Image (cartoon, rainbow, N blue to C red):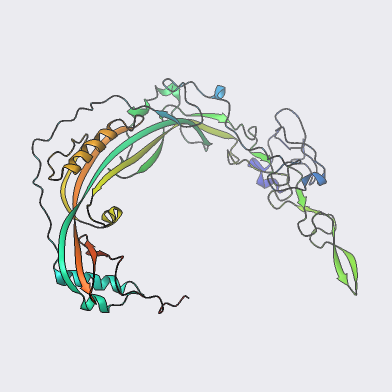
Amino acid sequence: MDPSQYPGGAPPAGAVGAVPGQGPPPQGQPYPQGPGAPANYGAMNPSETKGEAGKLPGGQAAPTPSAPSLNEMDNVGGYENVGFSDNCLPPPSYDESVQPPTERPEIKGVDVVNEDQAREALMMYVAEHCCYGKGAAETMKFTQLQPTNAFHYTLETFCESRSTAWAFEPFCGESLTPPANGPAPGPWDITPSPGPTMFQDGKMDLEVPHTASVKACHNCCASGWIQCNKCFGLGREQCTFCNGRGCSRQYIDGDWVDRSCTSCNGRGMRTCHRCHGCGRITCTLCDGKTRLKCYIKLTILWVNHVNDHIVERTELPDHLIREVTGHQAFQETAPRVFPVNHFPDPEINAASKRIVGSHAGAFPTERMLMQRHQVRIVPVTQAFFNWKEKDSDFFIYGFENKVFAPKYPQTCCWGCTIL
């Protein structure tokens, strides 16, 4: 390996795998054992490398980088219980009182469709189905158009949760704010910038000020290099063309003949493509920098919790109401909304009271930032018709005049072609 690939042109004195006065060990030679060397460094027979990548001899998984001991981390006031996994923090207390609004807008209805609009909507619906004939839509006789309204109540509760954990990254010489420079602010005292977008999910990771320090990399013992997990430090791996045999059998002139493998020149092993024969690679944790910046990471998570209730009293499936637009009869946004109590349909009022009450205690580890609820009135028309002396019906719903017609009388499949 070229010495220029090492930091400073040569491996540091005492670094794992360095031979005094000579740099890295010769190709194929094992790495020395000794203080500071990882436990899995050492001699291996070439036969021991015949396994899957990332597996030690015997089928065991190769060791993976772990976090340093918590005893090595700084003691930061207010963060004594922080580990390396996210620790969810309860929000501070805040005023949860809800005051009823002094005035609410009047609820207005929506327009209904006529026969021409109903026929046009059905024609567009038929055009989207290759097996539907348009004759019925063109010639059917409407016997009744029965308009109704579907009501869609929605409550959104926008919440924020915070968690802390120790984190580390390669130290590149940047300036730090260690604990000695001042006390670290509390997790809920930090103001994120930019702030959240209301009623949209989001996530932000921040470094808690005055918690950073520099530690020697525990993964490579501050050498910047680790043993190659492909060849386990040998610098060579089993040839995949001959499966380590060094030769391959070929059928020549009516007989099987062993020929030397051209890929490994008959050795059964070849230079490891990952470490290029050196037996070690750049440390994946410190990126060869030998030191880590350790700090407490604050993770802020914004979640918009949504629940709804649909009142629709025809055979039209309720879920279709969510997919179309309607008239927004009512909307309120406040830190804590008061249940709807003035809507003409009592089922909506009861649903609002139930859903608002359920959200009040549903998120104990999150802080409620804002709530928004609304009621949409979606027009629904049940169209009754007669075609070829048979009575049937279909539905027109939403401002888009969508059609639901499972009983359309003119359907066929004989004209379909499966590509």
**Which residue is more in the foreground, 20 or 232?**
232
Q: Quadrant of residue 157?
A: top left
Q: Is residue 393 shown above or below 276?
A: below
Q: Quadrant of residue 69?
A: top right
Residue 197 appears anywhere in the view: no
213 on left or right of 64:
left
Q: Quadrant of residue 93?
A: top left
State how many labels appear: 0
203 on left or right of 241:
left
Q: Is residue 65 shown above or below 250?
A: above
Q: Position of residue 243 (x, y in %)?
A: 79, 56
User: Residue at 55% of width from left, 33% of height from top?
Assistant: 292
Q: Position of residue 49 (x, y in %)?
A: 77, 46
Residue 169 appears anywhere in the view: yes
User: Residue at 90% of width from left, 66% of height from top?
Assistant: 257
Q: Is residue 265 shown above or below 156?
A: below
- Spot the residue most to the front: 389
400 on left or right of 235:
left
User: Residue at 36% of width from left, 33% of height from top?
Assistant: 161
Q: Position of residue 201 (x, y in %)?
A: 34, 44
Q: Position of residue 196 (x, y in %)?
A: 31, 41
**Which residue is more in the foreground, 82 or 325?**
325
